[in-house]
Amino acid sequence: MQEIQDEFDAHDTPIQIIGINQFGYDSGNEGMTTGRSLPWLQDTEEVDAWALWNVQYRDVYVLDQEGALRYIYNLTEHNLQQHTHRENLQNILEGLLD
């Protein structure tokens, strides 16, 4: 995801990728953020965004400019190491700008 964000930044594309770690898994935060510049938030027991949104592991929730959910893209099913999946996700994100 960092590489996709880097491409957006290089082309001044107004898209921001943000990670949200599941409540109870904060011990992995350092490993997820080391060497990366993507914003990384920690879900809390009080908010429990993962439960509110029924998030599955490795889901990418695509929100529009108003914060409305437009698409869910799971990275386990769509490995970004495969060019077609990476390109598809980039197209989904960029499609919200039209």
Image: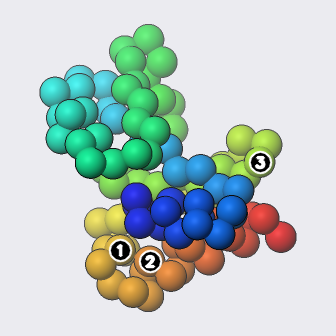
Q: Would you call the spot at circle 3 few (<14 residues within 10 Å), some (14-19), or many (20 or more)?
A: few
Q: Residue furthest front?
A: 10
Q: CA distance from mark 3 to mark 2?
A: 22 Å
In the rendered view, tell whether residue 83 sits above or below residue 90: below
Whether residue 51 is visible here, answered yes or no, is: no
The earlier-in-sequence mark between 1 and 3 is 3
Q: Amino acid at mark 1?
A: Leu
Identify which amino acid the numbered label 2 is placed on.
Arg
Question: Furthest residue to the right?
Answer: 98
* Element assignment for label 2: helix
Labelled disc at residue 86: 2
Instruction: Give the SS element for disc 1.
Output: loop
Q: Residue at x 26, y 48 (%)?
A: 35
Can you identify the residue that label 1 sits on? 80
- First of labels 3, 2 by sequence position: 3
Along the polypeptide, which appears first: circle 1 or circle 2?
1
Q: Is residue 76 left or right of residue 49?
A: left
User: In the figure, is residue 64 to the left or right of 80?
Assistant: right
Q: Are marks 1 and 2 in contact (CB under 8 Å)?
A: yes
- Residue 18, image x, y percentages: 49, 44
Residue 14 to residue 40: above or below: below
Residue 59 in sight here: yes
> How far apart in space, not on screen, are marks 1 and 2 (Cα)?
5 Å
CA distance for labels 1 and 3: 24 Å
Left or right of 30 in this view: 77: right
User: Which residue position holds label 3?
Assistant: 65
Using the image as rendered, state which of residue 58 and residue 91 is in the foreground.
91
